[in-house]
Amino acid sequence: MNCDNLIETEYMNPLKKLASETVIYGIPTIVARFLNWLLVPLYTSIFAPEKYGVVVTIMAYNAVLLALLTYGMETGYFRFASKNKDDSVFGTIVSSLFVTSGIFLSLICLNLDNILNFLNLEIQKEWIVFMALVLILDAICSIPFAKLRLKSKAKRFAIIRSLNIVSNILFNLLFLVFFPFIENHFNIDIPIFDINYGIGYIFVSFLLSSILTFILLIPEFFDEKFNFSLKFYRKVLKYSLPILVVSIAGMINLNLDKILLPYLLNSDEAIKLTGIYGANIKLAVIITLFVQAFRFAFEPFFFSLNKGKDSNKVYIQVLNLFTAFGLFVFLAVMFYIDKLIFFIDKDYHEGVVILPWVLLANLFSGIYYSLSLWYKLSDKTYFGAIMALIGSVVTISLNILLIPKFGYMGCAYALFFCFFTMALISYLLGQKYYPINYNIKRIAFYFCSALIIFFLSRYINLDNVWLKMFIKTPLLILFVILVLYKEKLFIFKR
């Protein structure tokens, strides 16, 4: 075996590990999340856009608050548990989350009236409490989930995550479909069910599934000694607090549009348009799940790979393949959108115009995540905070400027330019502080090829939807052939 083949074999093995763990994390999660995504057609068929807009808005707030409640401890756990055998790592971090979560719940309960006035939504007080409890459980469970990922227990991780989603689906079906069917068709009064509670049952379902997840993770808590080390706590806080800024800014970048949309639109239908925007974002679920599965596998992967040889070659190839596959998903969704759109009610169809921008925004968020390894490996996490804050400035500025003029299209533009800007800045800074010779020409080739194919497909306008999709399929195959040709050294060599 010559030297080139030896090097290729050495760094292809980690790639295979990353690919296999992405599949293990991804397939059960994708299947379960796809089932969960099928709740969107259910919600849009039962609730008017203005009702679903309330759910979209509350979930956007929750995403930002979850980042606040975990305050970077998940990444801190990865960093220190991967190189520190001290029993105090797990116990210190989990104990901290229990304390801060308790303080958070107390503040919520003491300020319910003020929160209701601030939100200015048609909601009930207990819904706020339900979602606060969901946030607390999710924050605490993030560390045992991180432990499973670090120890490469991908199957157990995927099973519990999937059960969380499947249970949420079942509870939704129970409250929104089964109980109403029983009452309407058999005239049976169900004591625990009130038909007028409406979207409240969505929040009840979230809470019940989070409780189930916590119960399933209890063995992970008792598997560790709960030793608290103040010295270590200071160390992990110093590392993790910049990650807190990154996480909060990241959630702002993903969710602020849904929060600002009802406030910035000078329209009586603002919350309705928020519902339409939120429902159509869900059509990007395929690429969102791909990015999520990649992130689950990639963080523990690159921390462990940092100790090995030729790691930079692996990082380069990971970015190439991630980008190519993400663009394939982008083309597939856009080529077959004429059928995908019917998964949501026709009252929401007008919002499909946001989809190309949202898909590419999600792709660039994954590219940014892949590029961001440099500041984590070099312990320069403050750069992550700076880039995330820049992204938030872009998000806030563009949303304020564009929403009054373009409505939810302004949200889509802001989302795209936010993640594009962050990916670009991360690449430029990474080349200075942790140089990796990424194959920018190849990545640019993939983007140009995909966009040319996409714009060519726009000229295929036929009344027959199935025939139109059939004619577009060779264009998708063409992109696959181009990628296979470019990556032939890695795909066809044994």
Image (tube, rainbow, N blue to C red):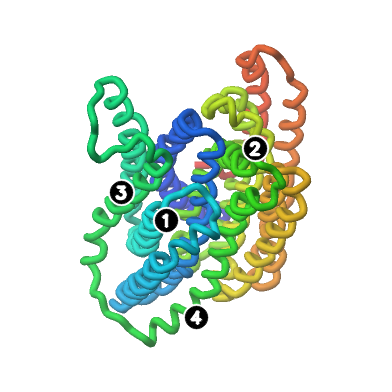
Horizontal side, residue 356 vs residue 292: left or right: right
Label 3 CA crowd tier, 10 Å (few <14, some 14–19, many 20+): some
In contact (CB < 8 Å): disc 3 and disc 2: no
Query: Which numbered circle lies on residue 238?
Result: 4
Residue 291, percent from left and from top: 53, 48
Query: Disc 3 designates what residue?
Result: 208
Q: Residue at x 73, y 26 (%)?
A: 457
Q: Type of residue at label 4?
A: Lys
Which quadrant of the structure image shows residue 106? Answer: bottom left
- Going from N to C along the chain, the mark reached first, 4 or 2, is 4
What amino acid type is highlighted by mark number 3?
Leu
Mark 3 or 4 closer to N-term?
3
In this view, 298 is above or below 268 = below
Residue type, mark 1 in image: Ile
Using the numbered discs, state the Cα–Cα distance from disc 1 to disc 4 in whole angstroms.
32 Å
Task: Check the image and report above or below for 73 versus 412.
Answer: below
Check disc 2 and report the residue beneath it.
355
Residue drawn at 39 percent across, 47 percent down: 203
Q: Secondary structure at mark 1?
A: helix
State the image coordinates of residue 168 (x, y, percent, origin top left): 35, 42
The residue that disc 1 covers is: 128
Cα separation, mark 4 vs mark 2, equals 39 Å
